Image (tube, grey):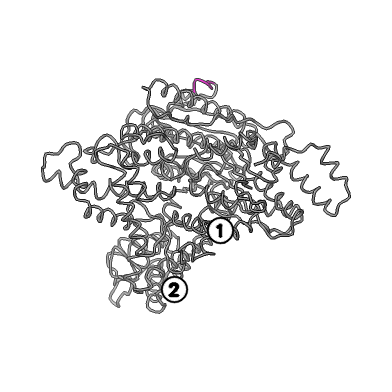
Amino acid sequence: MSDSKFTVPVAQESLHSELSERSPILSLREKILAIRNGLRPGQQQMADWQSGPLAISAVPGAGKSTGMAAAAAIAIARQYERSSSRRHLVVVTFTRSAAANIKAKIRKDLKKLSLPQTGFFVYTLHGLALNIASRHPDLSGLQLENVTLITPTQSHRFIRTAVEQWIANNPERYLRLLEGHQFDGEETERLRRQSVLRTEVLPELANTVIHEAKSSGISPELLREWSKQTTDEYVILSVAAGLYEQYQNLMRSRDFIDYDDMILAALRVLENDSARRIEQNQVFAVFEDEAQDSSPLQTQLLEILASDTDNGDNSSLNLVRVGDPNQAINSTFTPADPIYFRQFCEECDRIKRLATMDQAGRSTRIIIEAANFALKWINSQQSAKTNNRQQTTYKPQLPFRLQTIRPVEVGDPQTNANPAPVGRGLELYTPRDIHHTLELLSQRVIELFGEDPTQNSAAILVRENRQGRWLAEALTTVCKECKIILYDVGERDRRSHVPQEILALLQFCDRPHSPDYLKAALEALVQRQLIPTQDLNALASLPEEFLYPGPLAAPQSESVQKTARLCRNLLRARLELPLYQLISFLALTLNYDQAELATADKLAERVNQQIASNSSMGGMLSTLSEIVSSERFEPVETEDSEERYTRRGQLTIITMHKAKGLDWDYVFIPFLHENLIPGRFWVPPQSQFLGDFTLSEVARAQIRATLHEESIIPDVTQAWEVAKHLKISEEYRLLYVAMTRAKRLVWMSAAQKAPFTWSKPENLQEQAPCPVFPALKRQFPECVVNLGALIK
């Protein structure tokens, strides 16, 4: 990996000298220079890449996607210059919406270069894997016409069945779990523990370990080997290996695959010398965005694809990875782990191929100062705790990489950089309780949106969807009065509403005389605004009279007649249409938009494939019910999916996790309490008979310790401490992400009284604030809002 392959920022004199040369591609080089000059220094380092590995560590708001799109367009242009081959650039990112966004930006920059909008492909990691696997079905083992892709959750039937089969095959180990720390043999307690193990503890262990192991290429056999190095009384890794093995057998027997299988299938293809050369020879480089969210196997896939085969040196990577370890917020519930991107940055730094994008133009200066302070304060606190702890073999990493956000320099080429603050730019509130929080938040929203709400964008970032639902209900009237659009992302996107609505209508079509099914169908139609709001209980109580009123029935109102006609049309379609067309018909009836129609098509394809051997209404309902109850069915996203979250004139309620990659003029972060951020690992009372830990988190920590090549696998006590540290670190990174979503104002509050759990928001009690919140108040006293002065 020669240093000469990384081009440092080119001096202006040499560029102008180059442009003065007579060349048929002079105008192209001028256009490349124009794009490059419109970038910030960190973005320019990406644009100057020509070959070899390059790591870009970018702070929030630094313009990663803008820089990557420009760099991609310039790399494609240089490929046109130097080669007549049809090799293309592969750009990989984390989500479909991010892929659509960066694809549009690359096309725009290629248009500026007067080049065809081709020469590149943008994928999600799983999309790339599926593309490779589907081109070589004999090597990948995936016959796509015969397999079904699922997104298993803890309650998925394959997980549940794997648990039952493991229990049947391992009665002695199951009995050991049942006994726990102590057990007096009382029958009622035995039955209770059986239920907890079968429905909670073992499914959670299976779900966690399957994701962790498969995404890292770990087999059940290897897990068993690792288990021999542990001494815990439950042999947790061995139990996990057995559950994993049962799950794999079930998947194979039914021709089902999950997302990890797609990565493994692509790697099987690339193990073949001929297939690997075919794939590598189509690609001149790989650019990866959000690299901090990659798993080990995903990283391995990209490195193989990016290997330079022209010079026969597979160790030479044409790989650009862009990310921010400080925005790694998925590692405690997905196999992603920021340690791998940190390692890549360290390797690149050793060979002087690490660039830092530390200038950020998104936020006003006070927000940048607050985010930098929070990062340093949290690191210092966690470092002090680690030093005070007794010496152990485990040395935890600090939550954050020491990387300071810097405002852009004077004369920045990009417009609206570091905008002026609104009000104080940072506002810190300590309300009496959550109702006072709502009052203060509503008042500030009305002030900020002013007479013309269409000029501003704002969001309320919550830690849990339940907080979002509570806020949405409370703010509906206020927003309607002030002509502010209120958009609750959790309500709109939770588990995708499409399968649920389709199921409700199909259940009605199958049993129209059921009051419950009729009411559920009517609720779906009201939700879609296809029928007027009315007393649905009255209609559903007498289905026959509502649907087919006799001559002696009381006259129906116009709204009831309209509703009954629509319901009869649904029943007629059930009789006249073939089964495989029903879901598509219902999607059109529900007046779905483009994204929803695409999701319905995906659902129809999935259901029809699964019931091919048993094509019946019963089979369709059974399959749909399973998807709705036990799977996270991913909706199809359109290219403007992020735009609907950030529209002007709209107050968006969204979780902190989902807000990553987005920004608004004003961001509200209420309910900052210690029990949620950083929170703590809570062992449910019903499973405390096993000990003061959870099997799933201990297993996760033990697997990661082995993957990180630590000398020994931690015992249960150490693994539980590791798991707690990982959670605390990630929760603090989540707060950092939330704060850096704001452009002109971040509004933060920690009420004195709040619910212990948001499933019961009425039960208020004293709650300690998130530890960083009082520190912010001490550091920025001018930003603390005097609530007494607000009361007039």
Q: Would residue 700 be found to the left or right of residue 96 on screen?
A: left
Q: Residues within 10 Å of mark 2 (few under 14, many from 20)?
A: some
SS of the residue under disc 2: helix
Q: Would residue 626 be found to the left or right of residue 344 on screen?
A: left
Q: Nearer the viewer, residue 432 or 294?
A: 294
Q: Which range is magenta?
A: 777-781
Specify the principal SS of the magenta part.
helix
Figure label count: 2
| Label at residue 186 | none
Q: Who comes first in sequence, dot 1 or dot 2?
A: 1
Residue 60, position as x, y percentages in the image: 58, 37
Residue 786, position as x, y percentages in the image: 49, 23
Position of 433 relative to 291 (above/below): above
| Label at residue 273 | 1
User: Toward which corner of the image does residue 532 lie, by quadrant?
Assistant: bottom left
Q: Nearer the viewer, residue 202 or 481?
A: 202
Residue 538, position as x, y percentages in the image: 30, 62
From the image, tell me which residue sits under label 2.
581
Position of 777 relative to 552 (above/below): above
Q: Amino acid at mark 2?
A: Gln
Q: Amino acid at mark 1?
A: Asp
Q: Quadrant of the N terminus?
A: top right
Q: Would residue 512 be found to the left or right of residue 596 on screen?
A: left
Q: Is residue 649 magenta?
A: no
SS of the residue under disc 1: helix
